[in-house]
Image (spheres, rainbow, N blue to C red):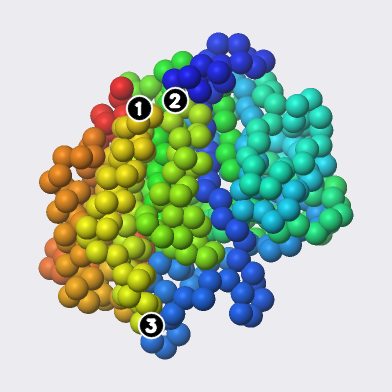
Amino acid sequence: MDELREDTRTGPAGQGNWITTWGTAQQLARPAEPGGGPQLPGPPDDDPPADVPADAPAAPTKVSAQTVRMVARTTVGGTAVRVALSNSFGHAPVRIDAARIARHDSGAAIHAGSARELTFGGRDAVVLPTGAQIYSDPIDYDVPAQTDLVVSLYVPGETVTPTTHELGLRTAWLAPGDQAATRNLRDATGFQSYLWLAGIDVLARPTAATIVALGDSITDGAGTTPGADAPWPSLLARRLAARQDLPPRAVINMGIAGNRVLRETDGFGASALARFDRDVLARPGVRWVILAEGGNDICFGFMPGMPDSERATAQDIIAGYRMLIGRAHLHGLRIIGCTLTQFGGTFVFTAESERVRQDVNRWIRGSGEFDAVVDLDAATRAPAAPTRLRTEFDSGDGIHPNDAGNKAIAEAFDLELFRE
């Protein structure tokens, strides 16, 4: 990764360190029509699967002759900026005829005079090849930390299926025609997902670095208040920013609701093993990865009607962890393991599924194979019922922490882990 950082220290602002200040993991948009999307066996009474938020807004599945405008909050500031666009899960190449970055005002509006054109190899239009991720040309642009930026993309007439991050938790908009440079969109329709927008990089201080939070829906922020920027990676970023004695540390959220370490599930993103290179190693400036995943490997296997082949043992999950640890260390990254939080009271809870969780957590705490361990189980469990979330941390489904629970998770991290 040192070689990657050295190669990217070019651009209009001269000396510095290119790091990812904001990012999101990519998925294929799930069809909204009846019968579309993943066919997962459901629990009794048609409740949603344990790791799939019932009120998660659906991403648009088709875009044609429209402008998409999305808001992203920086975690570290810089003097120049570039944007990463991804067609990792698209079925066909996607043409972007106009792209702009600006400061967010309110609603679908940007601050007057803040918009700058993004170019790609010197051109104002670009074709995203199938499976590719590309970067815009860097531009001088003052980017403070904890600032809402807006990226607007115009997709011309052909109908395309977007690569998306479904659980966006920030309102985005689709509007007819090319309105990428428009201050306030006309006839816009709101939704809460990211389309094609994979990351925003800044040219930061030479000591700056990025922390990647790789996880499932708990990392993604399911159960938190939309628009409040309350997922624990965001709260961890604000804790780090408040420590003036620490170098700048960006935190990017690579959580995907429903994600698993070992297996891919249609509509819920590639497994952690499959996406590690794209979502962790390819992020400029990455120095640490926080692994907070494995609960779905247990929960999915205990869903009613799920075949035995989908059931993961503690040994299976541990083997997956060891492969991810090896990948991180091969590239000089430090990897922090997080214990699995509770799902007692959900329909997937049994004595056997709890035994698997406890076996995995014992290994995380005691194996010494992670560079550090953060005990999220201890931070969130109910004292009188340790298989359950604390009542004040429960978003209402027994598995996803609310804003207060995410705050407790963020506060469980010793910030000294990220000093060097």
Question: Residue at 67% of width from left, 15% of height from top?
Answer: 12
Q: Amino acid at mark 1?
A: Gly
Residue 337 occupies which quadrant of the picture?
Answer: top left
Query: Which residue carries the number 3 mark?
Result: 305
Query: Which residue carries the number 1 mark?
Result: 332
Q: Measure how far apart labels 2 and 3 are at the Cα level.
A: 44 Å
Residue 9 coordinates in the image, percent (x, y) = 56, 16
Q: Is 401 drawn above or below residue 179 in the view shown?
A: below
Residue lying farthest to the bottom in this orientation: 45
If you read the primary sequence from the N terminus, does the residue marked by circle 1 or circle 2 appear first?
2
Q: Quadrant of the N terminus?
A: top left
Q: Is 77 drawn above or below residue 366 in the view shown?
A: above
Left or right relative to 224: residue 204? right
Question: Is there CB contact under 8 Å for labels 1 and 2?
Answer: yes
Residue 282 coordinates in the image, percent (x, y) = 51, 34
Crowdedness near tag 1: few (<14), some (14–19) or many (≥20) residues, C-alpha within 10 Å: some
Q: Quadrant of the C terminus?
A: top left
Q: Which mark is residue 1?
A: 2
If you read the primary sequence from the N terminus, does the residue marked by circle 1 or circle 3 appear first?
3
